[in-house]
Image (cartoon, helix red, strand yellow):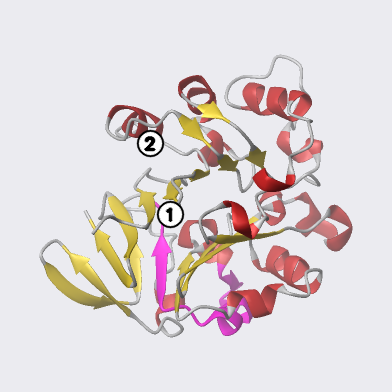
Amino acid sequence: MSIDFLCNIWKVEHGSAACLITPNERTILFDCGCSDDFSPADHLKEHGGLKDVDQLVVSHPHQDHIAELPKVLDLFNVKRRYSNPATPDRLVYSSGKKDLKEPHKTWAHINETWTGKVSPENSFTNHDSYGGVQFNTYYCKEAHLEGSAAENLNNYSILTTVEYSGLKIVFPGDLEPDGWDAVMDNNANLENDLAQGSYRILVAPHHGRKSGVRRGEKVYTRFLEAMMPDLVIISDKYGNDSTDPEAYRGWAGGMNVLMGDKWEKKEVLTTKTNDCVSIQIEGKTLTVKVF
């Protein structure tokens, strides 16, 4: 039986990169991180034979989320790009737009040139366009944030939920507690959306770092209470002690994960020690495996 739904979350050190293939073979990339040892774009071109990217979702334009953006646009026909249109330029281009270097040079270019309207059948939030996979996106505007929180680019991250056949995956970018409060206060359906699905997988905000899940020393629980994830995936590099897996263990119910040739119940997985976390659905069977 062929795989109906595939989502690979790759090891790109301190960075973010994931690829999702829908049942009707549409391709969605979440962020464009890479590492010195691994290029998701090269991998998709050389081993997957990928030519078209139907949607490129950029949570926010920090270096570790767009490092491979120029290469992605060079190697693939990227049909559409989705990001937070309310992200303030002053936070992206702190020294202005003159003499920009990559990848922000390319980021500025696509923001200035990709301005055409998207047809309904190709809209990212048109649930009929992706083989039954439902995508919802949420973000906050500057008016929703106060003080120093409004000067933190992480808080403008797009939050994307993915739902298919009882599975819910949440990609929150690098949202920190103030950003979570703003996006949840100003999107009435979000808390209900987070709670949907028989199996719920959270990609930890801000790579699982303390700043994404704590205010001071206290664990920020609002999104965890809303979602009650079964599994949390942390994307960061080996040896980075600023990640905080223990903050999630009391909230994650646990899922059976295929670790090589052995099944183990896991609450938290990390790309620190695994090259890829692969989420697959064949028929009605969900499998999470690492390799």
Residue 20, above or below 100 = below
Picture quadrant where residue 177 is located: bottom right
Amino acid type of the residue tagged 1 in the rendering: Pro
Q: Position of residue 276 (x, y in %)?
A: 30, 51
The mark lying in front, picked from 2 and 1, is 1
Q: Assess whether residue 229 is covered by the magenta stretch.
A: yes
Q: Nearer the viewer, residue 209 or 103?
A: 103
Q: Quadrant of the N terminus?
A: bottom left
Q: Position of residue 105 (x, y in %)?
A: 65, 21
- Disc number at residue 40? 2
Q: Position of residue 187 (x, y in %)?
A: 78, 69
Amino acid type of the residue tagged 2 in the rendering: Pro
Q: Residue at x 65, y 50 (%)?
A: 124
- Disc number at residue 187? none
Q: Nearer the viewer, residue 262 or 11?
A: 262
| Residue farthest along the left direction in this orientation | 261
Q: Residue at x 67, y 55 (%)?
A: 126
Res. 35 visible in picture: no
Local SS, label 2: helix
Q: Residues in magenta?
A: 213-236
Which residue matches tag 1?
Answer: 23
Q: Position of residue 32 (x, y in %)?
A: 50, 38
Total marks shown come to 2
